[in-house]
Amino acid sequence: MTALVFWQQHKITQKQRNLLNGHGSGVVWFTGLSGSGKSTLAGALEEALYQRQVRTYLLDGDNLRHGLCVDLGFSEKDRTESLRRAGEVASLMSESGLLVLAAFVSPLRSQREQLKEQIGKENFLEIHVATSLEECERRDVKGLYARARSGELTGMTGISAPYESPVQADLRLHTESDSMEKSVAALLQLLEEKGWLPVW
Ligand SMILES: Nc1ncnc2c1ncn2[C@@H]1O[C@H](COP(=O)(O)OS(=O)(=O)O)[C@@H](OP(=O)(O)O)[C@H]1O
Ligand SMILES: Nc1ncnc2c1ncn2[C@@H]1O[C@H](COP(=O)(O)OP(=O)(O)O)[C@@H](O)[C@H]1O
């Protein structure tokens, strides 16, 4: 069958937008159990970047599920589709020149590999928020673990659905031993090494 849609190559590139902004762009992808600290750390990093005059956007799984992914649940198939959509949005935002922070459980290695492919390895940093299940359950920020233990909630990541830790994350954060400030400093250093921060 002959193709019906064609890729339109436009003139202004990501690199040119980066030059205009004075900083690089890409996707900083936070993965970890519910309650591990993804949103908190991504939010703290975004504040630090704002102070450095870096243009950002924070994509949060919980928020996207109110709109773009409202039709999807938490089966493996639905999670994979939700992550694919989030990956497309993150990729477009990164191309547009933003430094995108993405906070999603993204539980399976195959899903994260897919995201890396979709977004492009050079535009992607994988951050593992490596908080133990015991600690996430102790925090139980949203009461989901209690509901999962009582049997009211099925398919809860870490309890009745799998979480596969990254083997080679670009950075692993330990919220049980390290302060938020220390984690944000490590993230900023990684972004500096990647060349995404302003040079001034
Ligand atoms: N079964 C189950 N498992 C895990 N999480 C659940 C579940 N049901 C609802 N929630 C809430 O949904 C948030 C995770 O959404 P994500 O889009 O990040 O998940 S995923 O990447 O598609 O796995 C997650 O947000 P965070 O706690 O911020 O991780 C929960 O608030
Ligand atoms: N060092 C730390 N870094 C990040 N979060 C921490 C830390 N210590 C305690 N917390 C707490 O852990 C909880 C993490 O919740 P949240 O950021 O919503 O996690 P997630 O987005 O992964 O579900 C918050 O209540 C936060 O205050």
Image (cartoon, grey):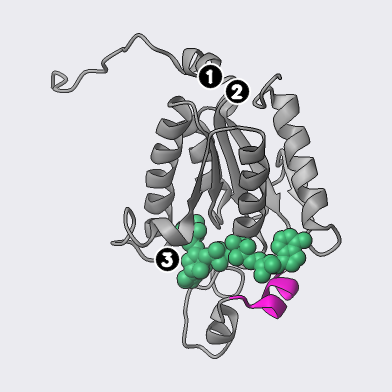
Label ID, residue 74 = 3
State the SS at label 3.
Answer: loop
> Which percent across, then down, holds residue 5?
18, 22
> Would you say 13 lies left or right of 37 here?
left
Read off the magenta span: 133-141
**Residue at the spot x=42%, y=46% of the render?**
86
Q: In which quarter of the image is ligand 2?
A: bottom right
Q: Residue tagged by mark 2?
A: 23
Q: What residue type is labelled 1?
A: Asn
Q: In which quarter of the image is residue 141?
A: bottom right
Q: Which amino acid does label 2 sit on?
A: His
Residue 52 visible in the picture:
yes
Closer to us: 36 or 134: 36
Instruction: Count residues near mark 3 (Cα–Cα under 10 Å), then give few for <14, some for 14-19, many for 20+.
Output: some
Query: Was residue 138 drawn as part of the magenta stretch in this picture?
Result: yes
Residue at the far bottom: name it.
150
Q: Are dots 2 and 1 in contact, CB under 8 Å?
A: yes
**Residue at the spot x=73%, y=28% of the render?**
192
Residue 140 position (above or below residue 165): below
> Would you say 93 lies left or right of 195 here?
left
Looking at mark 1, is its residue's CB closer than 8 Å to ligand 1? no
> Would you say 139 lies left or right of 88 here?
right
Q: What residue type is labelled 3?
A: Phe
Q: Residue tagged by mark 1?
A: 18
Q: Are dots 3 and 2 in contact, CB under 8 Å?
A: no
Q: Earlier in the sequence, mark 2 or mark 1?
A: 1
State the SS at label 1.
Answer: helix
